[in-house]
Amino acid sequence: MGVDVRFLGSGDAFGSGGRLQACILLSDGGQSLLLDCGATSLVAMKRAGVVPATIEHVAITHLHGDHFGGLPYLVLDGQFSRRERPLVVVGPRGVEQRTRELMEASFPGSTAVDRRFPVEFVEFEAGSRVDVGAASITPFEVDHASGAPAFALRVEYGDRSIAYSGDTAWTAALLEASRDADLFICEAYFFERSVKFHLDHETALRQLADHPVGRVILTHASADVLERRQELKFELADDGTLIRL
């Protein structure tokens, strides 16, 4: 079974380089899984010709707006497009409460509306696998402050495996999450500058030098990384990048 990995949004929180926020679509040709749903995700989907109502499952790494802030728009788009397919959101502790608070802050009264489709929230526990449609997700707690636990994710689709760092400083959990993975989607916020709670290209390069992992592709790049793209030793995702595993 093959898996398509489509970077609908590959940027940081600040739109560096005109990039959209974190939003990565996985599909095995049947069911779909969205890794993160940043505030610009609805724009990213419609720009790419992805019908939001076809998104069945969303996995959130952490509760920052550029990674989960698009959820209210995804729900409201379903409401106004008469969606009937259920939506399942898995994420850190508090993901339902924070989403509801964001919906109410943005669109007062929106959480009380009766919809044609159910929205189910499931909270991650570090190290405990969650089956989401055709995929199995294992969360690994990482080092990123967001008012709730932050996770790297390992996603198994049959015999294919994808690891995703989310946002984090370097931690050994990333080695565990990505070991022998077919693809590791790794944050590289800066090229070589060390910043609390984030990862840079040079640290990733050093830590992954002898690590058993397949393809590594970088995401969440700031202007610093974009300006030094030619010096990168790993691939850098763009909005629209498609990988077939």
Image (cartoon, helix red, strand yellow):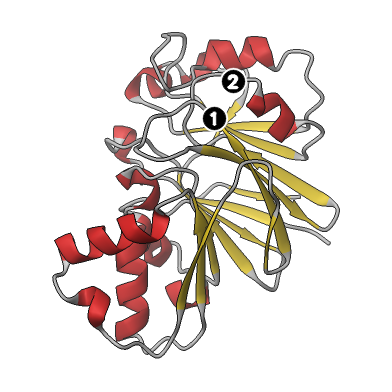
Residue 214 has which mark? Answer: none
Identify the amino acid type marked 2: Thr
Does residue 119 appear to the left or right of 110 in the view shown? right
- Residue at left 34%, top 42%? 64
Q: Position of residue 44 (x, y in %)?
A: 39, 57
Residue 142 has which mark? Answer: 1
Identify the amino acid type marked 1: Val
- Residue at left 33%, top 23%? 223
* 161 w.r.t. 235: above or below: below
Q: Position of residue 147 (x, y in %)?
A: 34, 38
* 164 w.r.t. 5: above or below: above
Circle 1: element type? loop
Pick the residue in front: 27 or 238: 27
Q: Quadrant of residue 154?
A: top right
Q: For the N terminus, which image quadrant?
A: bottom right
The residue tagged 2 is 171
Determine if residue 51 is in view: no
Determine if residue 57 is in view: yes
